[in-house]
Amino acid sequence: MLNHQLLSLIIKKEGFDQHISSFFADYLVNRKTNYSWNNFSSPTFNINVRVGQGPALSLILSALYLSPFIYILENQLKNLKIPTSFISFMDDGLFISQSNSIDISNSHLYCSYNVLTNLLEKFGLVVKHSKTEIFHFNKSHGVFNPPPLDLSPLGGNVLLPSNTWKYLGFIFNRKLTFHQHVDFYANKAISVVKCMKLLGNSSCSINPLQKHLLYRLCILPIALYGFQLWFYNHAPTAYHMKTLNKMQRCTVIWILDTFKTSPSYSVEAIAGLILIKLHLQKLGGRSQLQVYKLSHNHLLCSLIESNLNLSSNFKSTVLDSLTNRQHSLVKGHLIDMANRSHECFPSFSPLNSEFSPGLRIIDIFSDRFSFNIYDKRKDIKFQAQELDELTLESSSSPSVTLIASDASIKNNVATSIAHIHMVDKPLTKTIHHAVNVTSTEAELFAIRCGINQSIHFDNISKIIVITDSIHMAQKIFDSSSHPFQTMLATILSDLCDFFNRHDNNSIEFWECPSCLKWHLHGEVDKEIKSFNLTPLFPCKSSWDFSKKNKSDDIIKAWKMMFQASDLKRNHFLDLLDDDNKIIKPTYAKGESWLKLIGHLNSLCAYAIRAITNHALISKYRLRFFPREEFRCSCDHYPIESRQHILHECVRFNGYWNLRRDLYSHFVMFLVFNPNTFSFCDSLG
């Protein structure tokens, strides 16, 4: 329960504007409420305490209320020379004490708890002693039985240390191996998989594509909750991988309705599920890059590297104070994040005034910009004619500039070119090269250079931008958090200056895809293709490029492992795509195998049995039941094998094509011969 009068005083003392202090003083103090149920209405009660958990301001007000309390508590502990630290997650407080002796730690915690309870009473707050618990971390390999902590003289309970401790959903054990944490969430994910089976009914069940989507959106996030705690460089993860692999195998069997004896590596690839370890590497790499999204004065930046924060308040970091030996011994996700702190150049600028509500260009000049998007339903010649008319308009007016921009990437070198056309002036070109950026960033930079040059011409009232990346042009006015903010802040600043010069100044964006083959845009495209540069030295990457490059490397490793490894077994049927290339596993833009068979459970089951050679055919009987008949019923082959069924057996001529090694024809064969790899006895 928060004292509203004290909260109003805290807001005033912390330096907030007088209007804010007055608002909360009027909003919180002398509040009353009553309760109604049907025809009953209770008397009016005063509610000068408590901040409701529902309102959006409750978290902020609670943090403001507790901030002076934490400040006073830390000063009192420091004055009493009690070596404990205190952290708080809203109303969840945590004392941390480090010592070589359990008894000394308990005495420090006892004294800290005493100071805490006395101070909370002065603030009008109450400690729930029943929720208080104690936990000890210990590296010893022998039996560890720490003594209890008796808080009964302070009004608390006798705290008995447990073997695990759950805090904010994370389950800690004494040696920080996080085995119990992984077990808990892996079993929870398996339980969700079993519950997913209830989504189907007797007439229709969810298909493999839907199951795959449910797994990635609903189940996998549960299983990998808090993985940054235990998955980092040089961390022992054998137990965790074993547990999570069991979880994913259980899920794959549910997705594909396949046998429990099917090889895991094969069926996971068919289901479009990357190996758990590779998936964790991808997620870990992306998580390490999140530090670049933080503002420069964020505490986490000060912990990692001084180059991530530009504030003079953080000239040295915690990691900088470590010796080389200490730095080599310290491990964790924070260290991995620090090792990548020099990898990217700044891309985010969340606190820039150009993205602040009320100051954004879409709030002030919403009628000064427009987009003309290519319509596929219209005739190409008609839309090319529109661009020609636009060129004539710009060529007849000295106050109009026309920008044709484009970009491309070769050998990781991006080339951005903008041609600026004006009446009675020579063609102006901007050509820039950059290394380790994405194509979208290169396109945006070309637009940026064209706009920057155009606004510096005299008496310009209209700018026309012709680009084949209209979606990137629309991104200019997007104020949400994304890795192009630093570049967009410059463009928005230039446009604001341009719009402020005169009320009639405006900018138009026109889409010109390459299929139009429009002459001005074609000239830019031709010039771009004439460059063939090679980077000579390592360079920093953009945030988006680093994220994409890491993901691409992991997918390539997965494909190489799948082709070279024996884990998919020798009986795996390699099929060809429409380009006559062996199908490789992927999980992006539709799975390689599921895209043709994932819409139907029965077809998927038949295909999996055929591809993995786990089907009830005579070759299977020969291996496991050698006394049974194993000849093919067509009497043209001694053993009924998969190769014989697909390419030679005369019984299966419902769909005939010589190229049954093509995946599309293989699926058609199964559609026309549904009993081929089923459990029906009609094959005999």
Image: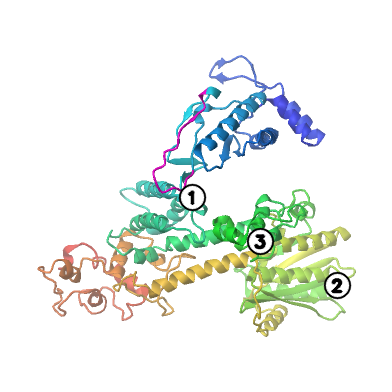
The disc placed on residue 483 is 3
User: Which quadrant holds residue 255?
Assistant: bottom left
Q: Position of residue 489 (x, y in %)?
A: 75, 60
Residue under numbered circle 1: 225
Bin the neighbour count of mark 1 within 10 Å (Cα to Cα): few under 14, some 14-19, many 20 and up: some
Q: Is residue 288 visible?
A: no
Q: Earlier in the sequence, mark 3 or mark 1?
A: 1
Judged left or right of residue 247, residue 50 is right
Element type at mark 1: loop
Q: Is residue 6 above or below residue 176?
A: above
Judged left or right of residue 322, residue 214 is left
In the image, what residue type sits under mark 2? Ser
Closer to viewer: mark 3 or mark 2? 3
The disc placed on residue 397 is 2
Give me the C-alpha separation between circle 3 and circle 1: 25 Å
* Residue at the right extreme, as displayed: 458
Element type at mark 2: loop
Judged left or right of residue 450, residue 516 is left
Residue at 53 percent across and 59 percent down: it is 284
In the image, what residue type sits under mark 1? Tyr
User: Which quadrant holds residue 294?
Assistant: bottom right
Element type at mark 3: loop
Residue 579: within the magenta? no
Give the magenta part as a residue range: 137-152
